Image (cartoon, rainbow, N blue to C red):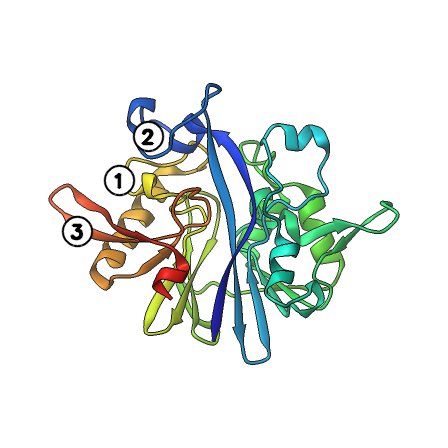
Amino acid sequence: MTIHPLNSGNFKLDGGAMFGVVPTTLWQRTNPADSNNMCDWSMRCLLIEDGDKLILVDTGIGDKQSEKFFSHYYMSDENSLEPNLNKLGFGLDEITDVFLTHLHFDHCGGAIQWNKDRTGLDTVFKNATYWSTESHWKWATEPNPREKASFLTENIMPIQESGQLKFIERNGDFTKNVFNNFDVLFVDGHTESMMIPHIHYKDQTLVFMADLLPSVGHIPLPYVMGYDTRPLLTLSAKEKFLSTAANDDLILFLEHDYHNELCTVQNTEKGVRLKDTFSFNDLF
């Protein structure tokens, strides 16, 4: 197995929305905001080579939305998914599996594109199986008013219409061997049944954090995003996960942290806190 981090772009989101009830004076220590209270965030993906499998975890926003849409998020095109995939020697058609942690637009938008004459929408990875889970799919396709703006029909329904969609079965909160050396933790709170990959790699366990832990600034338990639909469930899942991460020295891959790619955590008198940060290449 070989793993490659991929950046699909950078964007900005309101710091208050990203940190919920936490005061600005506290969260600005780790995530400084601009004059509009907007913080920088990344959209990192993972590419996993394993035998005849080429698995992509999340896809970023993509490029099919309107100029008005992108203007809200101050998108940076200095990194985008396809060129970074090409730099590794791979093309879009070589991806065998697209694993979507959840269906918010900044995680799955890059899975769908306009066709050549912009009359319809196609899957970007035409030879891939797209993986979600049934309970989350239902949640996303029958959205509540709180999340409706994050679940965009044009990102979701073309996957099903293509015939490329398959579901990972949820039995409890942890499913082993979804792929080789690839287990999945299911968490609720941010949204229904978000999937957190646990990848066993080079004698370490690498955990793709998605929106359970957007950045190192979110490690203290009360630092929960305002976007989370059920923050007390997030709090419970986060507390349980971080305890395990500290005790087992898990390596956390941060999808959204603009400044830090990987981190570890440790137990302290104040609870679980940051231990170290790393770049992927430094550690692996």
Is label 2 in a helix, a strand or a loop? helix
Q: Quadrant of the C terminus?
A: bottom left
Q: Please say if the residues under marks 3 and 1 sit with CB atoms less than 8 Å apart.
A: no
Looking at the rendered image, the disc whose residue lies closer to the viewer, 2 or 1, is: 2
Is label 3 in a helix, a strand or a loop? strand
Compare residues 193 and 101 and report the one nearer the observer.
101
Give the CA separation, mark 2 to mark 1.
11 Å
Which residue is under mark 2? 27
Residue 184, by quadrant, is bottom left
Disc 2 or 1, which lies upstream in sequence? 2
Give the CA separation, mark 3 to mark 1.
11 Å
Indicate which disc residue 220 carries: 1
| Identity, as a three-letter code, of the amino acid under mark 1 | Pro
Question: Is residue 119 left or right of 99 when viewed as pictured?
Answer: right
Disc 3 or 2, which lies upstream in sequence? 2
Is label 1 in a helix, a strand or a loop? loop
Which residue is under mark 3? 267
Inspect this view and state whether residue 222 appears: yes
Tell how many labels. Answer: 3
User: Picture coordinates of residue 147 (x, y %)?
Assistant: 55, 36
Inspect this view and state whether residue 173 appears: no
Question: Is residue 284 left or right of 150 when viewed as pictured?
Answer: left
Q: Please say if the residues under marks 3 and 2 sit with CB atoms less than 8 Å apart.
A: no
